[in-house]
Image (tube, rainbow, N blue to C red):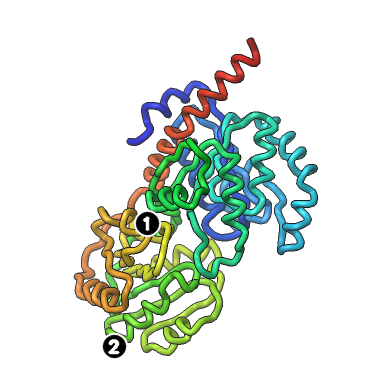
Amino acid sequence: MAGEPRTARHRDANLRVVVWQWGRYGAGPRLAALLARGLRTLGGIETILSLSSAAEILQDPNGPSCELQVKTYTGLAGLAWRFVQAPITVMQLSRRLRRLDPRIAVCAMPGPLDLLMVMALRRIGIPVAVIVHDAEAHPGDGFPLLLTLQRALLRRADLAIVLSNHVASALMRNGSLPPRMPVLVAALPPLAFDSVTPPDIHAGPRRVLCFGRLRAYKGLDLLAEALRLLGPRPDLEVRVVGQGPESAALADLRALPGVMVENRWVPEGEVSSILNWADIVVLPYREASQSGIAPTALAARRHVIATRVGGLPEQLKNEPFATLCEPDAGSLAAALLSSLNRPNDSVAPVDDAREAWRGFAAQVMEGLDPLISVTRRDQSMANS
């Protein structure tokens, strides 16, 4: 497993790693919790998970243990007030972190307040790694300054961890990475939902799911046109689930027979049941850095159809349950038709997502190891 030899050197060191992500909803808090859990499985590592006190994942009775909850904000006025309070917040965070005594920190997904955390970590001499998901803003993204804040965050970080070579190349092209910053490329594991079950053998139409943020770049218009090309089919049922602005593409999808559109926020507790409903997960994207839903669906042994854009070919090229097609309606329709003709008579076990996260955590530790060594050397010099 990638990273095992180096990680093993830390097992007797009781190394403390802060993993933080201060979003309230969506994949960010879950990703941070899964990374923290994966790091703990390596041995010799203690994790300090830091989430927003309002994170949806913490409302679950089976949610993760969170050692550093942080009050964040609601709305733009709350965000502005947090920046006004920045000197006080940084000082308070520094004190709390000093008591927890970490040796390194990882930002699991950049957000608006991360610069405050980095300033607090710098005050106590802790190196910082940032997991970068996107190099450029997607069309229709709702927080236009987030990429500007991400560049500022990277200028103050010690290591960039990216989830595809596609993103790494784009970061280098657009100047987001400081000169000589080390970059680690590690593929995103499944965003594991423990109650996702193997696909069932059922009578009736094949169930196709399009799940996630309903934005223009997700290719909802391509999906609508592909379904029009296929025509009404009694063997096909399509569900489009997620949240986004109403659009002509959503209206076109609603008008098609056999298609159900649910434009709404999906709570954490409902994601498993939506994935369990599906036989096939379709990603008709016009652009993509990589996908979080793709590895989650593949781990649950759902077939995935994805367009050949951005980091998706790199992410899915060796996956036997994945089909790549061109980002046009004809190619997508052909891929859907091929999947409908595939037998639906084999039930395979769900992959072990915990093992995938352990491997990802080991890769992360491989990248962090030089930073940890520098920190220890500096501490030894300070104590000599």
Is 111 situated above or below 308? above
Q: Residue 58: in sight, yes or no?
A: no
Cβ–Cβ under 8 Å for marks 2 and 1: no
Q: Is residue 210 visible from the viewing direction of this image?
A: yes
Quadrant placement of the N terminus: top left
Q: Secondary structure at mark 2?
A: loop
Mark 2 lies on residue: 231
Q: Residue at x 24, y 72 (%)?
A: 339
Closer to the camera, 191 or 63?
191
Which disc, if any, is residue 311? 1
Which of 293 and 151 lies nearest the eye of the viewer? 151
Total label count?
Answer: 2
Q: Amino acid at mark 1?
A: Gly
Q: Position of residue 267 (x, y in %)?
A: 55, 65
Image coordinates of residue 276 in percent, x first then y, are: 39, 66
Q: Earlier in the sequence, mark 2 or mark 1?
A: 2
Q: Residue at x 44, y 34 (%)?
A: 367
Q: Quadrant of the C terminus?
A: top right
The amino acid type of the residue labelled 2 equals Gly
- The residue carrying pointer 1 sits among few (fewer than 14), some (14 to 19) or many (20 or more) residues within 10 Å by Cα, namely some
Relative horizontal placement of residue 182, taking residue 18 as reference (left or right): left
> How far, Cα to Cα, is label 2 from label 1?
30 Å
Q: Residues within 10 Å of mark 2 (few under 14, many from 20)?
A: few
Of residues 293 and 87, the one drawn nearer to the viewer in this rendering:
87
Picture layout, residue 277 above or below residue 158: below
**Vertical side of 330 occupied by 274: above or below:** above
Instruction: State left or right for residue 214 relative to residue 296.
Output: right
Q: Residue at x 43, y 82 (%)?
A: 260
Image quadrant in which you'd find residue 4: top left
Image depth: mark 2 or mark 1 in front: 1
Residue 123 position in % (x across, y down) = 70, 32
